[in-house]
Amino acid sequence: MSSIAGNLLATASDITDSSDFPGDADAPGLRALDDALRCDICRDFYDAPVSLSCGHTFCSVCIRSALPISATCPTCRKAVAESTLRRNVAVEAAVATWQKARSLILRLAKEDIARNTRPQSSSHTQRHPEERSRKRKRSGSSVSVSDEIVIPSSSPVPSGSATPDTLPDTVECPICQKTVLSKKINMHIDSGCKRHLAEAPSGDDPTTMKGKQKQRWSELFNASNSATTGGKNKDKAKGKLRAKEGEEDTELNHIPKVAYDIHKQKRLVELLSEWSLPTHGDRNTLIWRHSKWVVLYNANVDRAPENRRSLDQLRSELRKAEEAEHKTRKEVVDDPVAYQRANKDMFEKLTEAARPRKPAKKQQLERAPESTVESMQPEADDGE
């Protein structure tokens, strides 16, 4: 019993409620804000919130489980349909932000109330101006020190420093294929490729010089081509990424509802096998399992992509829900006569155990001989 009580206390401490915040007199608006971000069906924070055509918002799992029972809004009782459900992205983002900041805001609100209700001493109010003046003096001294500006000495940058963008000293003329100084390439072409030729150094091989010049010209042309075509390639890459992202966003679609009455049990097994779900049980069990899966899966689609759960997590939720359903499910008897015959012995035991007993009379009958013997013993002693 102690362990059960401990578990109950632990679960109760994890449950949050809008009443955790102070009232409007001490913290105006906080309790109403916390309550506005909760579902009216489960009274917990919205999980994959969806809006109805009437404007009210609920958790996707809550409203999808409630609409098959009653096709009306649980708040205003207007007629609604499951096809009118729409994701409420703004509310989902607000709930996620509020859950992150809730504990901090609650703590600050309680500290503010405790600070306002705490009595202030007179000595504290008298020393307060002196401390403020001391702080001012200290801050003034620190400012004077920090106001000193030190100008570092700078050296002029040499004008003849080499840069990576400088042209090579010699290049190959594109017309005569001869080596020309890069600064005089235009004058060399204007002279009909007759003047301003560069002499190759004695230690360099002319063939290697031509190879280097060709390589330099090719680098220049490749750089210009890459500048013009680089933007197009980047745009194509971005387009592919956007297409992939669009495919990921549109991958998950809602599972349509199934008319189980027109399908045989074989078809129900196939529907469950498509999602790798268990296929054991009778027809009613298969129908319940698939309908619950449709609710869980469609609610997962209603979540934001970063909050969606994997299929394994959804299967785990389905298994837990099925275990809880088995604990509360009542057995349906189709043939009462056959059921009574099959469980006749159990019924007799239960009937015998339920019959009222009269232990008081039995105890009186057992005690009666003892009382008569005790009453006769004093008379025998007197006769002796």
Image (cartoon, helix red, strand yellow):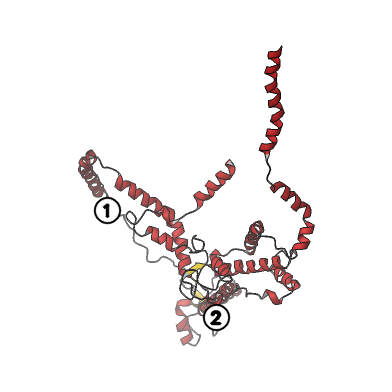
Q: Which residue is mark 1?
A: 149
Q: Which residue is mark 2?
A: 178
Q: Residue at x 68, y 45 (%)?
A: 356
Secondary structure at badge 1 equals loop
Residue lying furthest top in this view? 384
Secondary structure at badge 2 equals loop
> 114 or 72: which is nearer to us?
72
Picture coordinates of residue 244, whole percent (x, y): 58, 74
> 338 or 252: which is nearer to us?
338
Q: Is residue 276 visible?
A: no
Assign the C terminus to one quadrant of the image.
top right
Picture coordinates of residue 118, whole percent (x, y): 30, 44
Residue lying furthest front in this view? 383
> 72 or 278: which is nearer to us?
72
Assign the N terminus to one quadrant of the image.
top right
Considering only vertical position in the picture, is 232 above or below 316? below
Q: Residue at x 69, y 48 (%)?
A: 354
Q: Is residue 339 visible?
A: yes
Residue 158 picture quarter: bottom left
Local packing at callout 1 (Cα closer than 10 Å; few below 14, some 14-19, many 20+) is: few
Q: Is residue 126 left or right of residue 290?
A: left
Q: Residue at x 34, y 61 (%)?
A: 156
> Do the numbered discs 1 and 2 sit on residues whose CB atoms are within 8 Å?
no
Residue 365 picture quarter: top right
Amino acid carrying mark 1 in the image: Ile
Q: Earlier in the sequence, mark 1 or mark 2?
A: 1
Q: Is residue 114 left or right of residue 328?
A: left
Considering only vertical position in the picture, is 318 above or below 215? above
- Tag of residue 363: none
Amino acid carrying mark 2 in the image: Lys
Picture coordinates of residue 48, whole percent (x, y): 52, 66
